[in-house]
Amino acid sequence: MIKSMTGFGREHIVANGREIIVEIRSVNHRYYEFTSRTPRAYGYLDEKLKGFLKSGISRGKVEASVSIYNQEGTDAEIELNKAVAKGYLDALRGAADELDLDDDITLSHIMKLPDVFTVVKKTDDEEVIWNEVKDVAQVALDRFVQMRETEGVKMYDDISGRLDYIEETVGKIEDQSPSVTESYRERLYAKIKETLGDKDIDEQRILTEVAIFADKVAIDEETVRLRSHISQFRGLIKSDEPVGRKLDFLVQELNREVKTIGSKANDLTITKMVVDLKAEIEKIREQIQNIE
């Protein structure tokens, strides 16, 4: 089934000391165009996301945003500077001996001294971060695609209804077409009779003129091609593959055949039906601009 190019998907998790949020949104575009917003420290995610999302999105202007928040304290390690601590301890004990003081030094005393502990920010493993982001992005992508599919069903129903109307109108045009030639024959006969009065009318000449006229206004080939295009259209909108560009081509072909019928018809009733067909085809054309 066809998919819309408009979609949105979001997922949010907290795991391994990190809060990760991924949002994906898109609007219609002729090709796959990708932009992303990621934290400066995680710029390496941009290209990875672009390739990952392309596996599930063939067309559309896609924007992905990633937010990563490290929970307090989880992105840092505390290191004990043993050499500094030992230096402090030796100095304090030496002073206690020299000043004849009790040696009541405890760990809590050492902890309060400068430079005994160092806070070291952890270096993120890019592959670990990417795998975590990818898992979140996959869920967001699934929701994004689901929204596109839901919109696609609505578009399918609308286009199918319009194709039914177009096919029905083509049938009416086919029914009306023979009367165009007959009407012309009657008008021609009446005009010649009015001109010649009681003189003999050359029936063969009339038949020849009518045959030439009938050939000029014949629309059989156009209606056959119209029905073929409609059949192809119906097949494509049932496809799970991206078909937006193919549908765009078919709409042009539908327009071409209808315009030709309008120019050849030479009949007011058919002309009115052609106007209706053009309006329906234009509505379909507007719809398929948003089909993947």
Image: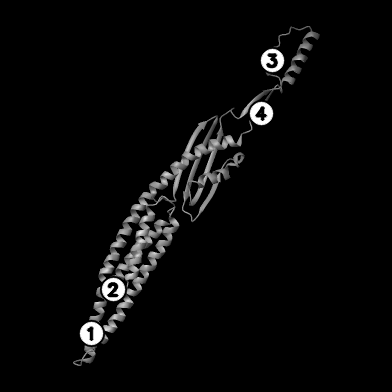
| Residue named by callout 1 | 189
The mark nearer the N terminus, 1 or 2, is 1
How many numbered tags mark residues here?
4
The image's mark for residue 268 is: 2
Query: Which corner quadrant of the image does residue 265 belong to?
Result: bottom left
Q: Residue 260's spot in the image, x, y percent?
A: 37, 71
Q: Residue 237's spot in the image, x, y percent?
A: 38, 54
The mark nearer the N terminus, 3 or 1, is 3
Residue depicted at x 24% and y 77%:
182
Residue depicted at x 34% and y 59%:
231
Q: Are marks 4 and 2 in contact (CB under 8 Å)?
A: no
Tell me the mark number nearer the camera, choosing from 3 and 2. 2
CA gap, disc 3 to disc 4? 22 Å
Label 3 sits on what residue type? His
Residue depicted at x 50% and y 49%:
62
| Residue named by callout 4 | 120
* Extreme residue toward the front, this view: 204
Residue depicted at x 31% and y 56%:
161
Label 4 sits on what residue type? Val
Label 1 sits on what residue type? Tyr
